[in-house]
Amino acid sequence: MLRILKSFSKRILSGLFRKKDSVKIGFYGPPNAGKTSLANIICRDWTGEEIGTVSDIPHETRKVQFKEKVEIKHKGKTLTFKIVDTPGIATKIDYEDFLKYKLKKSEAKKRAKEATQGIIESIKWLDDMDAVVIVLDASQNPYSQVNVTIVGNLVARKIPVLIVANKIDLKKADVKKVESAFPDYEVVGISARKEKNMEEFYESLFRLAKKI
């Protein structure tokens, strides 16, 4: 009887702690930080397909987009991810901000409305994330209200976080300033545009997955 109970307990525990078939990783951050650019590199490297389009106009991504079963191999280890690319988080969206990009007024208003809806959708998706990669523009002030809001939401949900300081190819980029702003999290500096330091990023991504 004791042997049966031990065997039963072992099966129960192994079921509880069995590794997930796919780790859901959300890419969050302010507009134009490079979330989709980074997600595109990952998906292109490991699936041959990109996840979305990018442009210089803020809020190009206005709906949550994802790619299932992205199998990443690194240093003899393999992990399968569900990559979730989300619209840029902003505290305020004004259609007039889009007019300087030579959009028509009607198109600017439509983009602003869709971007607002996208932010709401992004926050809702947080409850479904196993871990989150926060992508920041390393040439911008990391102490912004938007960044603090994003991190605050993740802390409240106890979601493992990796911070990516993107655009290190720019002269004003300051990875150390990003590290100082968020000392409780691992920060990795990359350039998605030039695909620089991607090896370091993948190492950080695998470490993030271990925290789940």
Image (tube, helix red, strand yellow):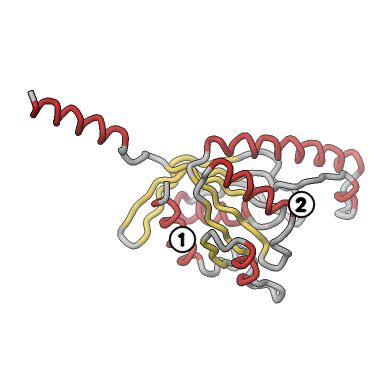
Above or below residue 138? Residue 30 is above
* Horizontal side, residue 126 vs residue 118: left or right: left
Above or below residue 89? Residue 128 is above
* Horizontal side, residue 65 vs residue 210: left or right: right
Sooner in the amino-acid sequence: mark 1 or mark 2: 2
**Which residue is rendered at x = 37% and y = 56% of the image?**
73
Q: Which residue is identified by label 2?
A: 58
Mark 1 secondary-structure assignment: helix
Instruction: Calculate the distance from the C-alpha at mark 1 to the C-alpha at mark 2.
Output: 27 Å
Residue at far top of view: 1
Quarter of the image for residue 94 reads: top right
Where, quadrant-wise, is the N terminus in this rendering?
top left
Residue 141 position, x and y percent, is 73, 64
Residue 69 position, x and y percent, is 43, 42
Q: Amino acid at mark 2?
A: Pro
Quarter of the image for residue 172 reads: bottom right
* Horizontal side, residue 61 vs residue 45: left or right: right
Q: Which mark is residue 12?
A: none
**Which residue is rendered at x = 68% and y = 54% of the image?**
147
Mark 2 secondary-structure assignment: loop
Q: Mark 1 near mark 2, Cβ–Cβ under 8 Å?
A: no
Residue 210 position, x and y percent, is 39, 52
Would you call the spot at circle 1 few (<14 residues within 10 Å), some (14-19), or many (20 or more)? some
Between 180 and 24, the one nearer to me in the picture: 180
Quarter of the image for residue 188 reads: bottom right
Q: Amino acid at mark 1?
A: Ser
* Horizontal side, residue 112 vs residue 40: left or right: right
Q: Which residue is identified by label 1?
A: 204
Residue 97 position, x and y percent, is 87, 50
**Which residue is rendered at x = 75% and y = 47% of the image?**
90
